Amino acid sequence: MILWFLKDRKFYVKEAVKKLTKAIKWRKDFNVAELTEEAVKDVAQTGKAYVHDFLDIYGRPVLMVVASKHFPEAQDPKDDERLCVFLVEKALSMLPTGKEQMVVIVDLRGFGTENADLKYLTFLFDVFYYYYPKRLGEVLFVDAPFVFKPIWQIAKPLLKSYASLVAFGWI
């Protein structure tokens, strides 16, 4: 675990330790060790996100997100957060020897304004930036509708260099 933080901070030990300490505290406060399939069963049954059974062609676990099934007004944001962290942990547990990153594929078919959730996007950024650094290899947005463009324009500057991990594709 410490290697992720060292790489993220370009082996500047003081900064890596600071970030790692924050992550350890967060893991304890968030009860990451207690997240189980049973604990996230209800929100997982929505089909909004899951870890694919197979690795991608580069040997990375694939976390699939179906954005049209995310309704922030109808769902408890804490349940969504727990599902996210559970799935990240599950994907990381599938990493083959020598691999360190996962890929996230976000299916945006059917995405509308009712699915937009900037608060959750902020949570996702924090998760990958602060608590799982260097674990996200690529994010693929599939079939992004016109309504997604302004959301991306707001989110992109917040991602800084991480925005380079994002690619768009169409089926």
Image (spheres, helix red, strand yellow):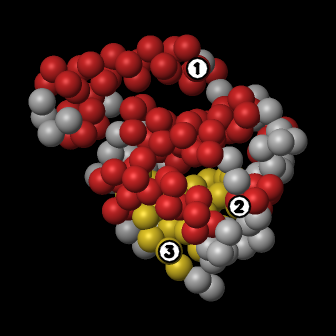
User: Which amino acid type corresponds to the residue marked 2 in the rendered image?
Assistant: Val
Q: Is residue 87 visible?
A: no
Give how far apart the Cα atoms at labels 3 and 1 are: 32 Å
Q: Is residue 7 left or right of residue 28?
A: left
Residue position for label 1? 30
Q: Quadrant of residue 16?
A: top left
**Residue pointed to by mark 2:** 66
Q: Are marks 1 and 2 in contact (CB under 8 Å)?
A: no
Q: Nearer the viewer, mark 3 or mark 1?
A: 3
Mark sitting earlier along the chain (3/1):
1
Q: Residues within 10 Å of mark 2 (few under 14, many from 20)?
A: some
46 vs 137, left or right, is right
* Residue 23 position (above or below residue 92): above
Mark with earlier residue (1, 2): 1
Q: Which is more toward the observer, 74 or 84?
A: 74
Asked if the residue under mark 1 is in contact with the one under mark 3, i.e. CB atoms within 8 Å, the reply is: no
Disc 3 residue crowd, few under 14, some 14–19, many 20+, Cα 10 Å: few
Residue 121 or residue 100, whichever sits in front: 121
Indicate which disc residue 84 carries: none
Q: Quadrant of residue 32?
A: top right
Q: Which residue is mark 3?
A: 168
Note whether 31 is above or below 160 in the view shown: above
What secondary structure is marked by label 1? helix
